[in-house]
Amino acid sequence: MKRCDVVVIGLGIMGSAALWNLAEAGITVLGIEGGGPTHTGGSSHGGTRIFRRAYWEGEKYIGLLNRAHELWTALQDKTGRRLIIPTGGVFIGPRAAGVVAGSQRTAIADDIPHEMWDAARIRERLPAFQVTDDMQAIYEPAAYAIAAEEARLQMVNEAVRGAGTAWYGDPVESLGSTPHDVTVRTRSGQVVQAAAAVVTVGPWMGRRLVPELRPHLVPNRVPIYWFSPRPGRMEDFDHKRFPVFLYECQDGSLLYGIAAGTSAEQGVKIGFHNRQHVPADPDTAIPRVTDHQRQEIASYVAQIFPDLEPSPIDARLCYYTMSTDESFLIGASAQSPRVVYASACSGHGFKFATAIGEALAFLAQQKPPPVELSAFGAARFDAASRVT
Ligand SMILES: Cc1cc2nc3c(=O)[nH]c(=O)nc-3n(C[C@H](O)[C@H](O)[C@H](O)COP(=O)(O)OP(=O)(O)OC[C@H]3O[C@@H](n4cnc5c(N)ncnc54)[C@H](O)[C@@H]3O)c2cc1C
């Protein structure tokens, strides 16, 4: 039997961040991942993710966002790797609709540097985007792309240089707990005993290891696509000119994207945030992106970006694990207080991972986390069900 202070189950970005933070604190920590180091079965794979602070989703995220930014910077400084790719961010939509109004509200409340652009200014500054006259944009100069896969691997690398160990390819099959410790059993028969467990298994969260979360989480498969600029238009889509973006259409569809040249992936990465979700069992084989899905995104891209070839050059599937209010679930299990967890997806969790990993490291040591987390506790759903 192996013994350690803390065992982390699942090494997507949240588990890798917890492993890194625990090892940095000198805690002996073992991370166990069911897949390989760069598998594509969960939510964290791929070259890049968006970081932005003018957050249309609400001001409750600001504390975590600010801490996450400090820690992304610290990780970049420590590793000497290029983990932050400055691009700026532009969030476009009908005036006063959700994305523009919400982003502006948070930017004002937290004093985040930003500019408001009308349609004429958007056309002047960003000729790659087509907008209608009633559209507006909020531009956040300090938004950026995170080198996602590199960052995740660097977290694990930093951890194993210190007090951390990582096992890959051996899924955890059971997690038991007493008031004093936890016991984990893996598929290959390894048994691990620790003072606490951190469970960060993404779309698998409610299925086996933290079943109390099952009513609040739905894993959805969502496609992500890459598009080529038309001949001669490459410069307009390079990250030096083309910010990370959100684009809210008149019909409410919300697209996001990241410039070409931010990772080894070819082309401009674009996806729907709120369309093409298919509820799915994460234990079944991942199917292909359908022709219908490709045609649908092509029709949006043709309207918004006439200088991109509308047919995607690549398309892959990923999981959005949606909570019922599209926010995060972070805390200690009500049934097993030595088990702490984070389900921080709903399609927007990656940018928070450094701060969530730190919070999980504190919770696993039964210390209060540096950033207040009560807005992200599962108790909010119990309170909501009592009201209705
Ligand atoms: C296409 C796409 C684009 C996105 N874009 C952005 C963005 O721009 N900005 C942003 O902030 N967020 C974005 N997100 C959301 C973000 O990627 C997720 O919030 C984040 O990756 C969730 O990470 P996780 O570690 O919780 O889950 P996962 O990455 O799914 O990791 C869970 C891990 O647990 C492992 N596991 C499962 N069961 C077991 C077991 N029994 N034993 C051991 N290991 C197990 C899995 O193999 C997996 O590696 C995007 C998501 C997608 C899908």
Image (spheres, rainbow, N blue to C red):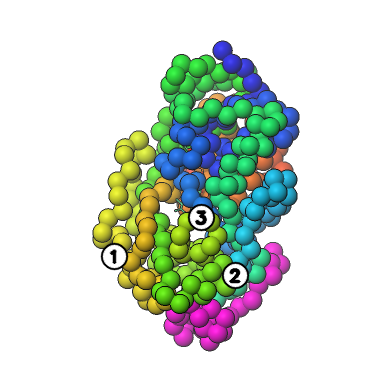
- Check disc 1 and report the residue beneath it: 295
Q: Is residue 334 above or below residue 268?
A: above
Of discs 3 and 1, which sits in the foreground? Answer: 3
Residue 218 in view of the camera: no
**Residue type beneath disc 2:** Lys
> How far is mark 2 from mark 1, CA to CA?
29 Å
Look at the numbered discs 2 and 1 and tell me whether their residues touch, using CB distance below 8 Å: no
User: Which label number is shown at residue 264?
Assistant: 3
**What secondary structure is found at the residue carrying circle 2?**
loop
- Looking at the rendered image, the disc whose residue lies closer to the viewer, 2 or 1, is 2
The number of numbered discs placed on residues in the rendered structure image is 3
Label drawn at residue 142: none
- Label 1 CB sits under 8 Å from any ligand 1 atom: no
Q: Name the residue under label 2.
A: 240
User: Residue 112 sits in which quadrant?
Assistant: bottom right
Is residue 49 visible to us here?
yes
Q: How crowded is mark 1: few (under 14 residues within 10 Å), some or many (20 or more)?
A: some
- Under mark 3, the amino acid is Ala
Q: What stretch is highlighted in magenta?
A: 108-136
Disc 2 residue lies near ligand 1 with CB under 8 A: no
Mark 3 and mark 1 lie on one chain; the one further toward the N terminus is 3
Q: Which of marks 2 and 1 is nearer the N terminus?
A: 2
- Residue 262, by quadrant, is bottom right
Horizontal side, residue 23 vs residue 210: left or right: right
**Residue appearing at x 54%, y 47% in the figure:** 149
Considering the numbered disc 1 on the image, is that residue within a helix, a strand or a loop? helix
Query: Any magenta on residue 124?
Result: yes
Classed neighbour count for the residue bearing mark 2: other residues with Cα under 10 Å, few (<14), some (14–19), many (≥20): some
Q: Which residue lies furthest to the top in this view?
A: 1
Q: Residue at 39% across / 77% down in the picture?
A: 306
